[in-house]
Amino acid sequence: MPTAVIMPKQGQSVETCIITRWFKSKGESVSIGDILFSYETDKASFDLESPVEGILLDIFFGDGAEVPVLENVAVIGKSGETIESFNPAPSLSIASTAFKASAAPEALEALKAVETRPDFDNKIRISPRARRMAENKGLNYNNLQGSGPSGRIITRDIERVHSGDAAVTKNIQTEGAEYTEQPLSNIRKLIARAMQYSLQNSAQLTHHMSADVRSILEARQKIKNKLLTDKSQQDITLNDMICWCVIRALLKFPEANSHLLDDRIKTFYKVHLGLAVDTPRGLMVPVVKNADDMDLAKLSKELKSAAEACKKGSINPESIQSTAATFTVSNLGNYGVEMFTPVINLPQVAILGVCTIINRPANLGNNTFGFVPYIGLSLTYDHRAIDGGPATVFLKEVKEQIEAFR
């Protein structure tokens, strides 16, 4: 019996989703776990995997279609099985039949060309794995000639471009135009609107401070040493430790753990920590609820789980709403950023930017000077909700929590 492929319901408030790209074609064999298509809600982007093995007998909605949640999108089964009852819009098939009966020959030829099109994405044929590899490496594959079946771009093509293969690079430069142009994805539009709204509708100011990270680096080194011999040792990162320190500071200065809602401020007793995560789909900020109740090991697991869910496209949309978190941490230290101005995720009243570690000359005591590792901290706060003094005191508390880490 055929199996319907249903548009998932991602969150209570989501009523429709937009199909952004199909990776399988009608008539193609699929296996359990194969990515069928990607889709977007008004909050995030996801991939839908095949629930069964079989043949993709029909596709009811193409690229760009807005589909109600829990609606049949496609049907998978065995060749020759009856699938009419799965079609959510049979009237479209009836209209098509009526058109064929009365259409001119040239119109029929055009319709036939569309109906027999082998792929909804016939302009760029690329395997899902190769697409993800290209996005992770920041490579533009629009004009790349694939070496896979039917010219499909596969992982070895992306690897050749990334390694600087001259023949492939020349092919891209000579076959394509001077530039590429494509519409913004839904999630990119959402990010753009959110950033613009935040800057236009708040009084944002950023303070910068540095913290001595010798204690944290020492703790991190001990963990790395244990990882070499102890398989049960959990890998706790510098970012995990800094988030732990931020939570401790928020408990002491809850003014920063607030939402500004029109003419009132909602200050939270619990810390629901947001973590900015860079994904191939765009920036996402998942929340770790009740982070103040967790020990460092538990916090580390939850942060990693949230980040991984964003990158896989399996995050619950309710978890990335701006109202879900009470405070956000954005870490660009791995990129070598020495100082930046993070943008507040409204209605939150503050966000902490974590920068790279730089060795600076410092007094080690007894008139002895040496180089000490300092990490940059950039606190952006909404001056409508917090004054400069309390914001500075909070940032100083984060610094002291980091320097006193044990």
Image: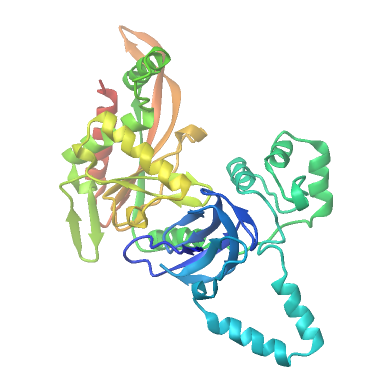
Q: In this view, does 295 lie above or below 268?
A: above
Residue 169, by quadrant, is: top right
Q: In this view, does 32 lie above or below 92?
A: above
Can the viewer see residue 341 in this picture?
no
Q: Where is residue 5 in the image (x, y as percent from the top left)?
A: 49, 62
Q: Position of residue 47 (x, y in %)?
A: 50, 54
Q: Nearer the viewer, residue 294 or 64?
A: 64
- Point 69% across, 44% down: residue: 154
Residue 97, by quadrant, is: bottom right
Q: Nearer the viewer, residue 338 or 144?
A: 144
Q: Position of residue 143 (x, y in %)?
A: 75, 53
Q: Is residue 109 above or below residue 149?
A: below
- Point 62% across, 66% down: residue: 80
Lateral position of residue 400 relative to residue 174, left or right? left
Lateral position of residue 380 relative to residue 404, left or right? right
The quarter of the picture where the C terminus appears is: top left
Q: Where is residue 161 in the image (x, y as percent from the top left)?
A: 73, 39
Lateral position of residue 37 relative to residue 112, left or right? left
Q: Nearer the viewer, residue 45 or 193?
A: 45
- Point 64% across, 57% down: residue: 28
